Amino acid sequence: MTPVIGLMGNPNVGKSTLFNCATGLKQHTGNWTGKTVGLQAGTARVGDRTVTLVDVPGTYSLRPVSEEERAAAAFVTEGQADAYLVVLDGTSLQRSLPLALQILSRQPRTALCVNLLDEAEKQGIHIDTQALANALGVPVTGAAARSRQGVAEALRGALSLVDGPAPRPAPPDIREGESEAEACHRRAAELCALAVRRADGGHRLRQLRIDKLLTGRRLGIPAMLLLLGLVFFLTLKGANYPSRLLEQGFACLEAWLRRALVALGAPAFLTGLLMDGVFRVTATVVSVMLPPMAIFFPLFTLLEDLGYLPRVAFDLDGCFARCHACGKQALTVCMGFGCNAVGVTGCRIIDSKRERLIAILTNGVTPCNGRFPAILALLTIFFGGGLLSAGLMVGVVAFSLGMTLGLSFLLSRTVLRGQPSAYTLELPPFRRPQVGKVLVRSFLDRTLHILLRAMTVAAPCGLLLYLLGHLPLRGPSLLAGLVRLLDPVGHIFGLDGAILTGFLLGAPANEIVLPLTLLGYGATGVLGPEAASGALGPALIAAGWTRGTALCFLVFSLLHFPCATTLWTIKKETASWGWCLLAAVLPTIFGLLFCLLLRLTAAIL
């Protein structure tokens, strides 16, 4: 049978990178703690043999506190692999060795791989892997998995333990009054004194100076906002021209398809249904969404690959602690910028059930990629472009973060009372981003994935809206009737019936809320040329929009019920319709209250 080798190690030691390199699978690798949230399996060739590699969630100890760590501990204690390969961090070997010693005491068929040797060399750290092998009595190899060096040798070392006799590594001596963990840490210090040599520490000093700037009490959060502002500015500047090109291309394609349908003798109703309904709504969503995503996601992924996201969590840890929430929630907020459903799933990295629920219930107020295009468009139309719009976009993000903290505090003092728990957060060394991989991964894993999801939602919505706009209801269409019904309610909160209709019918995906609003003004179920980026401003102003209306739309876009995908993910993660309902109702109530406050303020001024 195919031998099974389990990849073990602390978080952020390059375990998943080694797994991807060996198996060819494209498991997402990220430079922050707690990324791996499940078991990944793949096959690899070692010489003339095939082995099954299992990427086990990162853990610091075999005494687990989270679901992922329990899975890792069970994988070792139950002997679910024929051999184990423990990946160690060459830049911080003393921190990585205690886990390896615990695994060796339970599973002697364990080999070690000291990874990140390239980064260790930059820091003036030299590791004698042969001295470690002699001291422990098991195979020890070195690797730099990001550049594919030493991966094959590490796998051969682990495979050599499958067929031969099991080694007999000496367990750490446990002294009187000493726990196993303390004995392992003491033994790790002894091994490092034997095998590690340090030279010039200039590289480490530079890292510390950069961290002092990015994580300092005075400059940490301003630096974070400045970086976000730069990302948004580049996104705003770069997205306009490609959007116009896509609009023109889709207009030409629509004209050609319409002529083809007429030539084929298609009925007028069917032509309108397909072209004015399905095609035009889908084309508008693609032309509005694709350019900002194609710019924003690579830039954000570069920051992730650089190792900046853990610094964000460090900067915000005190804020979340004061709200009786977990600092790891900052990482799930960062995931929510791409997709709230992904952010909800990422809450598994939080150990405490109470704090995990707080993170899940508040992730919906983070502006996801589906909301970015509409927010950026409205800021440009009503408040000018360039640096001003980028600054206002940072303000929108800061407002959403403030609401996340406020709702977290509210939940922690009401239905989810409790004190914040302690956790370990690593600040990994800054690494040179792999630009090619970042571009490919951000496009395939994020941009294309979310775009396809938006298109699968937009197409049936376009069909439904065309039908609503053409089916009569005692005179006006169903769409016009719904807009007229909601109009008095909308005006109370500084909105109108078309906006509320857009949010209600856009529940499947936030990407289509603004196009649906435009449909509501026409009430015909046909999206006209006003959806194009150049004509959007005049169309909204003609519909009665003011800066106050735009502000209320922006606030309600941030604070309303999450999309259907996110709500379904919340239901699966919490196994409760009650928490799912609270996640929908709570932000909506606050969104309506803020909109009412804005309308009253505008009326007074």
Image (cartoon, helix red, strand yellow):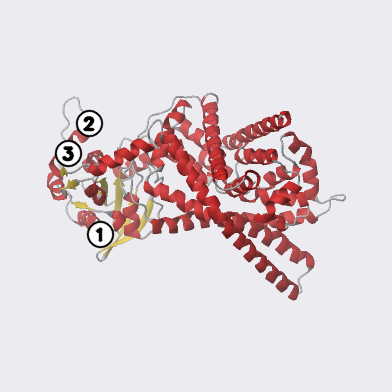
Q: CA distance from mark 1 to mark 3?
A: 28 Å
Name the side, left or right, on which 165 lies relative to 549: left
Residue type of the residue flagged with mark 1: Ala
Q: Nearer the viewer, residue 471 or 105?
A: 471
How crowded is the residue under tag 2: few (<14 C-alpha within 10 Å), some, or many (20+)? some
Q: Residue at x 42, y 32 (%)?
A: 317
Percent x, y of residue 520:
75, 49
Say which label, 3 or 2, has the lower sequence index: 3
Residue type of the residue flagged with mark 2: Glu
Percent x, y of residue 321:
44, 28
- Quarter of the rendering occupied by the N terminus: bottom left
* Outermost residue, right side: 474
Label annotation for residue 90: none
Residue type of the residue flagged with mark 3: Pro
Quadrant hosting residue 315: top left
Quadrant hosting residue 603: top right
Determine which residue is flagged by label 2: 182
Determine which residue is flagged by label 3: 171
Say which label, 2 or 1, has the lower sequence index: 1
Q: Nearer the viewer, residue 544 or 172?
A: 544
